[in-house]
Amino acid sequence: MKMWRLKPFLFCVLVLSNIFFLLVITVAIYFSVSYFFTKQISSARLEVLYSNQLKLIERLKDIEGTALAISAHPIAKKVLEDNAGLDMYDYILLQRTVTDWLSTLTYIKPFINSIQIYTDRYPEYQKIGQAGKNIILPVSKIPWKEHMPRFDSVDAVWIPSHRDEYSDGGPKPVLTYVLKVYDRRGAAAGFIAVNLQEDSLARLFYSESEDTSPTNRSLLLLDADGRIMSGMSAQVNAPLMATFREHAESLGGQSGFRHIRAGGSRYLMIYSKNNREKWSMVEFLESDALYRDVNAIRNIMLLIGVIVLLVVFPVSSYLSSRIIRPVPHLLKGFQQIESGNFHASLEAHTIVEFNKLVSGFNAMADRLRGMMEELERKNRLKRDLELTVLQSQINPHFLYNTLDMINWAAAVKGNTEVSFMAARLAKLFRISLSGGSAFILLQEELEHARLYAQIQQTRLEDRFSYIEQIDPLLRHCYVPKIILQPFIENAIIHGFSSQYPIKAEVTVRADKLGEERMRLTIADNGVGMGKTAGEAQKRKGSSLYVSGTGGYGIKNVRERLGLYLGNEYELRIENGETQGVQVTITLPLLDSPEKVHRFKDRYEGVPI
């Protein structure tokens, strides 16, 4: 791990914290100003867009009204009637009359580029060719044939921007309003097409003021179905119109604004609300021009931050030196404590916080001195206790050796019963010693319990039986030693009396619970728990009495399990389902010495 000196560490912390603070403030101010600036600009531009939209709707209604007036005019009705008896001269005269009449309309309304009437009433004369502007044209001459299927459901449609081939001075871009006209019998007689100059819309929306009409902007007109009808753009944005159209087609018909990227630059897209009755408009403004003031604010903030940082360096250096000035005195005091001088003491300081550190250091030195004296006293007691424990271990070894001698003496004299009991009691003592280890294999623990049961069976003859039901896989698992015998002894002492009608039976089971736990169960068929004190005393007086530890053994098991395993065990004593008492001990599954080793710090030093 990398080590730091206190002064450079404090210096770096102060400088970096100030840099971080300035960056956060700069970023927060920049984005806040950008957000509110964008919101205000968008709201203002949206108002302008709505104003332009009203102008657009007014112009469109004017065109639609013109087309409707033409369809109702007697001259148009005459053109669209069935004129089977009309000769060539009459047709030319009619054509000229219509041309003069419609030219008057286009003169009055200069934003109308041209007007055509499409009909198949004059197939013979229309083959001859044009006459003047040839206002009356056959249906086969319609330039927007791809939109004809739309007339199956409506009688009037707007055609998106296209070129009018019948314009004066060459083709011009127009938007066309087409009205389907019917004759007296209700059959389709033809179409009236009014061509609106697209340039007139640009002049309508692009004013002379740069504040109300920025030069670097683009407009798209969408009809009620979201179809792009026209696009008007500053010359610099002309190559980007295809990209603008893609973004406009993804709108959901609501008003608002969003940021987009086109041609490597960012643009602000502002769009008005669309509905089924009027057209909508989408405006694109280049962000660099809009955010020129915001970027100036950002640059000013960065400049202020650089100036502040230049001031922060000397201030941080001075503060770090000032803060750590009392620290060497504290370090010197700790060195004295480390060398064993617990009588070290520091003088009071004028700064409150450092004075508290000095007071805490002096109090710590006093407590350490007292703790060392207490520790020395406890070490003396511990040595005395270890000597006592070593002396107490002589007794089990002495009993084991003595019982072994009794076993051989009884065997030599032919007293097999005494030899049998002495041999098992000696083996029981040998297992209980187990080399001083707190954990033994389950098969050794079972052997210890079995030896005790065999001794009791020898004494009680056919009034007691002992049964084992063990999972073979668990026999080589480790358990704390001498945890079964006290419960077997308790069952014999308190569970049965000499007048108990059935044979006393104790069963020991071992089961595996999942992958990490095991369960030991000691069950008897005795009278169970819950008797009154008088009944318990009476039962004790006439029980199959066995001298032993009684309740002290169970308490000892519980305490040792707590010392060895902490909270990783469970011990339950309860009445059986039908009779007797059932003891359940749940333990961790220790199937290797490595798993036992993790409890080493718990059982080491605990008297066995």
Image (spheres, helix red, strand yellow):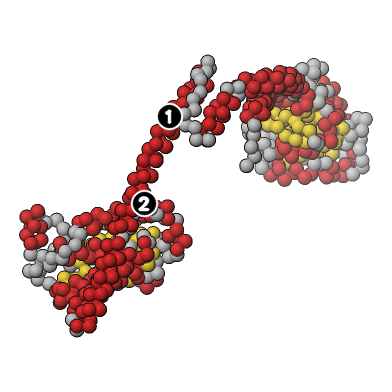
User: In the drawing, what numbered circle is on residue 574?
Assistant: none
Kind of residue at disc 1: Asp
Which x, y percent locates residue 441? 37, 67
Q: Is residue 225 above or below residue 329?
A: below
Task: Name the quadrant of the N terminus.
Answer: top right
Quick one: label 2 or label 1, which is nearer the N terminus? 1
Residue 54: % across, % down: 69, 23
Give the distance between the C-alpha atoms of the residues marked 2 and 1, in whole angstroms.
34 Å
Q: Amino acid at mark 2?
A: Gly
For mark 2, does the 10 Å Cα neighbourhood hold few (<14), some (14 to 19), or many (20 or more) residues? few
Please identify, in this view, whether the residue under mark 2 or under mark 1 is nearer the observer.
Answer: 1
- Between residues 204 and 233, which one lies in front from this camera angle? 233
Location of residue 224 by image quarter:
top right
Residue 183 seen in this snapshot: no
User: Relative to 32, is 522 on the left or the right?
Assistant: left
Q: Please state which of residues 479 and 20 is positioned toward the viewer in this rendering.
A: 479
Report x, y in % for residue 506.
Answer: 21, 69
Label 2 belongs to which residue? 566
The one of 595 and 181 positioned closer to us in this rendering: 595
Instruction: Label 1, secondary structure: give it.
Output: helix
Can residue 238 be seen? yes
Residue at the image point whose x is 49% and y is 32% from the top: 341
Q: Is residue 210 above or below residue 502?
A: above
In percent of the image, x 53 and y 15: which residue is there? 350
Quadrant including the C terminus? bottom left
Residue depicted at x 27% and y 74%:
404
Determine crowd level at label 1: few under 14, some 14-19, many 20+ residues with C-alpha closer than 10 A. some
Give residue 84's quadrant in the image.
Answer: top right
Report which quarter residue 535 is drawn in. Answer: bottom left
Left or right of 594? Residue 577 is left
| Circle 1 residue | 366
